[in-house]
Image (spheres, grey):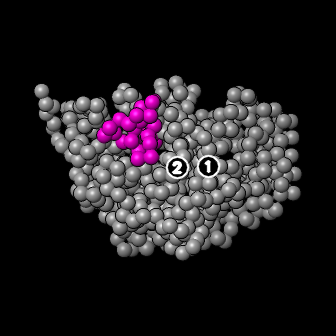
Amino acid sequence: MDRVWDEEFDVVVVGTGAAAFAAAVTAADAGRSVVMLESTPRWGGSSSMSGGGLWLPTNPLMERAGAADSRDEALAYLEVTVGDAGPAASPERRAAFVDGVADFVTMAERLGMRFTRAAEYPDYYPEKSGGKIGRALEVEPFDVRRIGPWWTSARGQDGVPAPVKTDDFWLLQRAWSSPDGFGRGARVVGRVVAGLARGRRLVGMGAALTASFLEIALRQGVGIWLECPLEEILVEDGRVVGVRASRGGSAVDLRAREGVVLAAGGFDHNTALRQQHQGVDGSASSGSRGNVGTVIEAAARLGAALDLMDDAWWGASIPPATPDGSAAFLVSERSVPHSLIVDSEGRRFANESESYVDLGHHLLEHARQVPGRFWMVTDVRHARRYLRSYALDPRANKAMASAGILHRADTLAELADQIGVDRQSLQETIDRFNGFARTGIDHDFGRGNSAYDRYYADPSSRPNPNLGTIEKGPFAAVEIVAGDLGTKGGVVTDEHARVLTPDGSVIPGLYAAGNTSASVMGRTYPGPGSTLGPACVFGHLAARHLTGTVAAAARPATPAAAH
């Protein structure tokens, strides 16, 4: 007996983050009918709350600006940074990512997306072969009034509530310590005021990215169904033909004539899965609370291979101060001067300014050797000179203090007692660190040696912009844990984003992108936007493949530098 379908579409996309939107608008651009399913009442996923950067080597904006980059350099850089990290990061998938960048960007611009380069943002290992500065793109601040009532259900409201861009953010961090930081702050305020004067309500970063995607999708006629979680992936004669979802309390069977794309995030807030695969509970994740891994589990039930389930987009975070609170993911705060991170014995163990995924891995590894709590110790100049996102809300500060996460003291000895660290050990660590700050060379961990370190730094701090002594009270210590931007493991896919079984066979009709899929970046983080860049490109490639359409234009035969 033939199945009776409640609705039929050419393409069903599960999720509403950047990867999902990239797949949806690409399929719709090819003339296909598309519906997007969101399990929660709010669309946009973790992408909406993120910095919104997309790491896209050899992108068209670089070529237009005359910024030298090439396919060979990009692939060489991925080889040296990602290396052999399993099937998700295969050479074929790395090449597909790089080769898909230009077509994705060109299509998105044609559909109305306004990209800009983060021209000064370096790759995270810029000194390695093929490393560059300025490969990341982001979307210009977006007027959310253009999407009408859809903004009221946007998860982007949980992100940065201002039209801030990446190159604003790294200067805003030193708004009180330097003329360029103060000037950038004035520009951001001016942008807000000008927008309001023109009747606009501008947002930036991840909120701008997903809102731009939404506007395109609505114009194309893409259906966006909120509170419609996936229950089952439906198969007939060995091929995925649709999905069963729950809508309005009832099960609905949706036919997907050409394919299903899974792009619903990872398992950030699934405590059982995180304990099973990673040994953490996920409470310090900054990912969307709707990311609970049900879509990954549904694919696994069909026989999909899984990879990198033990890994995440790690980083140093301040744990939530209340059971229903959110963790604070740290980027610039741990990199600017007058700060360091110590373990429970009062010792440093890593370069505080290194890429967040590296520091996250170091936190996890070191915790196995030296159990206990980790602390970022600062002196009063850290508080006075730099924008500290975790300390802007007095209510949050009070909650952190009540929870024993934040401590303040007039002397280092008192601070050591408060955080349970040996006084002498902490003083010896800080004395040694202060010596490095005065000479400008961190002989232990090389903080400030890389261009990436120096991106989040204070050039007025000499001789090393990342180092400053810790000697002026009052002092503070805030607890640091290994948090994340989301999980990195998921279903294994090929260069077309088709879902694979453990023997490498394709599951016909099923595709995946974003954090639902195991990352092409393996166990590292090559540059700013290494989550969203591949997410969008592989969402785009999935739709290209399932609709049988090809790139609008072939890649130039010569590197961008030759034009």
Q: Nearer the viewer, residue 395 or 320?
A: 320
Q: Residue sitting at 53 percent across and 35 percent down? A: 308
| Quadrant occupied by the N terminus | top left
**Direction from residue 348 to residue 226 in the image, left or right:** left
The magenta-colored residue range is 492-517
Q: Nearer the viewer, residue 175 or 514?
A: 514
Neighbours of disc 2 within 10 Å: few (<14), some (14-19), many (20+): many
Classify residue 135 as left or right of residue 492.
right
Residue 376 visible in the current orientation: yes
Tell me if residue 333 comes above or below residue 486 in the rendering: below
The answer to whether residue 506 is magenta is yes
Q: Residue at x 13, y 33 (%)?
A: 4
Residue 429 percent across, percent down from the top left: 83, 42
Quarter of image, res 266 = top left
Q: Which mark is residue 178?
A: none
Q: Which residue is mark 1?
A: 79
Q: Is residue 127 magenta?
A: no
Under circle 1, the secondary element is helix
Q: Which mark is residue 94?
A: 2
User: Residue 183's spot in the image, x, y percent?
Assistant: 60, 72
Three-letter residue code for mark 1: Glu
421 relative position to 295: left or right: right
Q: Are marks 2 and 1 in contact (CB under 8 Å)?
A: yes
Q: Amino acid at mark 2?
A: Arg
Mark 2 or mark 1: which comes first in sequence?
Answer: 1
Residue 108 sits in which quadrant?
Answer: bottom left
Is 549 placed above or below 430 here? below
